[in-house]
Image (cartoon, rainbow, N blue to C red):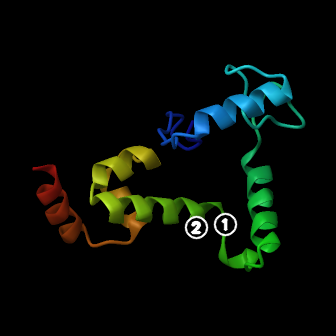
Amino acid sequence: MQQKTGRPVQFELLPDAPASLLAWLKRRGNTVDDNVFPSRVDHNGHLSTRVYARLVDEWMAGVGMKRSEYGTQSLRRTKASIIYRATGNLRVVQILLGHSKFEHTVRHLGIDVKDALALSENTEM
Protein backbone atom coordinates (compact mmCIF):
# COMPACT_ATOMS: atom_id res chain seq x y z
CA MET A 1 0.00 0.00 0.00
CA GLN A 2 1.23 3.44 -0.80
CA GLN A 3 1.64 5.35 2.43
CA LYS A 4 0.57 8.74 1.07
CA THR A 5 -2.61 7.62 -0.68
CA GLY A 6 -3.45 4.33 1.03
CA ARG A 7 -3.91 2.77 -2.41
CA PRO A 8 -2.27 -0.49 -3.50
CA VAL A 9 0.81 -0.18 -5.72
CA GLN A 10 1.22 -2.66 -8.56
CA PHE A 11 4.60 -4.17 -9.29
CA GLU A 12 6.15 -6.66 -11.63
CA LEU A 13 7.45 -10.07 -10.55
CA LEU A 14 10.03 -11.68 -12.78
CA PRO A 15 9.40 -15.38 -13.60
CA ASP A 16 11.66 -16.79 -10.84
CA ALA A 17 10.31 -14.49 -8.12
CA PRO A 18 7.14 -16.41 -7.10
CA ALA A 19 9.08 -19.61 -6.40
CA SER A 20 11.72 -17.66 -4.46
CA LEU A 21 9.06 -15.88 -2.41
CA LEU A 22 7.28 -19.14 -1.62
CA ALA A 23 10.59 -20.74 -0.56
CA TRP A 24 11.34 -17.73 1.67
CA LEU A 25 7.92 -17.90 3.30
CA LYS A 26 8.21 -21.66 3.80
CA ARG A 27 11.64 -21.25 5.39
CA ARG A 28 10.19 -18.69 7.81
CA GLY A 29 7.21 -20.94 8.56
CA ASN A 30 4.78 -18.46 7.03
CA THR A 31 2.06 -18.64 4.40
CA VAL A 32 1.22 -16.53 1.34
CA ASP A 33 -1.13 -14.50 3.56
CA ASP A 34 1.76 -13.31 5.75
CA ASN A 35 4.08 -10.36 5.20
CA VAL A 36 7.13 -11.33 3.16
CA PHE A 37 9.29 -8.99 5.26
CA PRO A 38 7.69 -8.83 8.71
CA SER A 39 8.41 -6.27 11.38
CA ARG A 40 10.70 -7.33 14.22
CA VAL A 41 8.58 -5.28 16.61
CA ASP A 42 5.00 -5.98 15.45
CA HIS A 43 4.91 -9.60 14.29
CA ASN A 44 1.62 -8.98 12.48
CA GLY A 45 3.00 -5.92 10.70
CA HIS A 46 5.43 -5.40 7.86
CA LEU A 47 8.97 -4.09 7.77
CA SER A 48 8.87 -0.35 8.38
CA THR A 49 10.03 2.17 5.80
CA ARG A 50 12.66 3.37 8.29
CA VAL A 51 14.16 -0.11 8.64
CA TYR A 52 14.02 -0.58 4.85
CA ALA A 53 15.89 2.72 4.40
CA ARG A 54 18.56 1.54 6.87
CA LEU A 55 18.91 -1.74 4.97
CA VAL A 56 19.37 0.13 1.68
CA ASP A 57 22.09 2.23 3.38
CA GLU A 58 23.83 -0.95 4.53
CA TRP A 59 23.55 -2.56 1.07
CA MET A 60 25.04 0.50 -0.61
CA ALA A 61 27.93 0.62 1.85
CA GLY A 62 28.40 -3.15 1.47
CA VAL A 63 28.99 -2.85 -2.29
CA GLY A 64 31.24 0.19 -1.91
CA MET A 65 28.78 2.88 -2.98
CA LYS A 66 28.32 6.18 -1.18
CA ARG A 67 25.35 5.84 1.14
CA SER A 68 24.57 9.54 0.81
CA GLU A 69 24.10 9.24 -2.97
CA TYR A 70 21.63 6.34 -2.97
CA GLY A 71 18.43 5.75 -1.06
CA THR A 72 14.94 4.36 -1.34
CA GLN A 73 13.72 7.28 -3.46
CA SER A 74 16.66 7.17 -5.87
CA LEU A 75 16.08 3.42 -6.36
CA ARG A 76 12.38 4.10 -6.98
CA ARG A 77 13.23 6.86 -9.47
CA THR A 78 15.82 4.68 -11.24
CA LYS A 79 13.41 1.75 -11.68
CA ALA A 80 10.73 4.09 -13.04
CA SER A 81 13.23 5.62 -15.48
CA ILE A 82 14.36 2.19 -16.69
CA ILE A 83 10.76 1.12 -17.34
CA TYR A 84 9.96 4.40 -19.10
CA ARG A 85 13.04 4.16 -21.35
CA ALA A 86 12.25 0.53 -22.18
CA THR A 87 8.55 1.02 -22.93
CA GLY A 88 7.99 4.73 -23.56
CA ASN A 89 4.69 4.15 -21.77
CA LEU A 90 4.04 6.79 -19.11
CA ARG A 91 0.74 5.21 -18.10
CA VAL A 92 2.54 2.01 -17.07
CA VAL A 93 5.04 4.00 -15.01
CA GLN A 94 2.20 6.05 -13.49
CA ILE A 95 0.41 2.87 -12.37
CA LEU A 96 3.58 1.27 -11.02
CA LEU A 97 4.44 4.38 -9.01
CA GLY A 98 0.87 4.73 -7.76
CA HIS A 99 0.56 8.32 -8.97
CA SER A 100 -2.94 9.68 -9.36
CA LYS A 101 -1.87 12.43 -11.79
CA PHE A 102 0.07 12.18 -15.02
CA GLU A 103 1.95 15.38 -14.10
CA HIS A 104 3.35 13.78 -10.93
CA THR A 105 4.84 10.94 -12.97
CA VAL A 106 6.36 13.33 -15.49
CA ARG A 107 7.88 15.40 -12.67
CA HIS A 108 9.14 12.24 -10.93
CA LEU A 109 10.93 11.18 -14.12
CA GLY A 110 12.28 14.68 -14.73
CA ILE A 111 11.02 14.90 -18.30
CA ASP A 112 9.29 17.68 -20.22
CA VAL A 113 5.47 17.45 -20.18
CA LYS A 114 5.11 18.27 -23.90
CA ASP A 115 7.71 15.63 -24.85
CA ALA A 116 6.01 13.10 -22.61
CA LEU A 117 2.59 13.77 -24.11
CA ALA A 118 3.94 13.49 -27.65
CA LEU A 119 5.71 10.23 -26.87
CA SER A 120 2.68 8.89 -25.03
CA GLU A 121 0.41 9.59 -28.02
CA ASN A 122 2.83 7.81 -30.37
CA THR A 123 3.14 4.68 -28.19
CA GLU A 124 -0.60 4.26 -27.58
CA MET A 125 -1.38 3.71 -31.25
Q: Quadrant of the N terminus?
A: top right
* Percent of width and height locating residue 100: 37, 44
Asked where in the image residue 88 lies, by quadrant, the reply is: bottom left
* Percent of width and height locating residue 85: 34, 66
Q: Is residue 67 above or below residue 44?
A: below
Q: Is residue 124 above or below residue 33?
A: below
Residue furthest to the left in view is 125
Q: Residue at x 66, y 78 (%)?
A: 69
Numbered badge on residue 71: 1
Q: Residue at x 33, y 48 (%)?
A: 92
Numbered badge on residue 74: 2
- Crowd rating for badge 1 (residues with CA inside 10 Å; few <14, some 14–19, many 20+): some
* Percent of width and height locating residue 106: 33, 63
The amino acid sitting under disc 1 is Gly
The CA distance from mark 1 to mark 2 is 5 Å
Asked if the residue at tag 2 contacts the one at tag 1, i.e. Cβ–Cβ closer than 8 Å, the answer is yes
Q: Is residue 44 left or right of residue 106?
A: right
Q: Residue at x 44, y 59 (%)?
A: 80
Asked where in the image residue 117 lies, by quadrant, the reply is: bottom left
Asked where in the image residue 82 lies, by quadrant, the reply is: bottom left
Residue toward you, 34 or 98: 34
Q: Residue at x 49, y 34 (%)?
A: 7
Q: Is residue 59 left or right of residue 121?
A: right
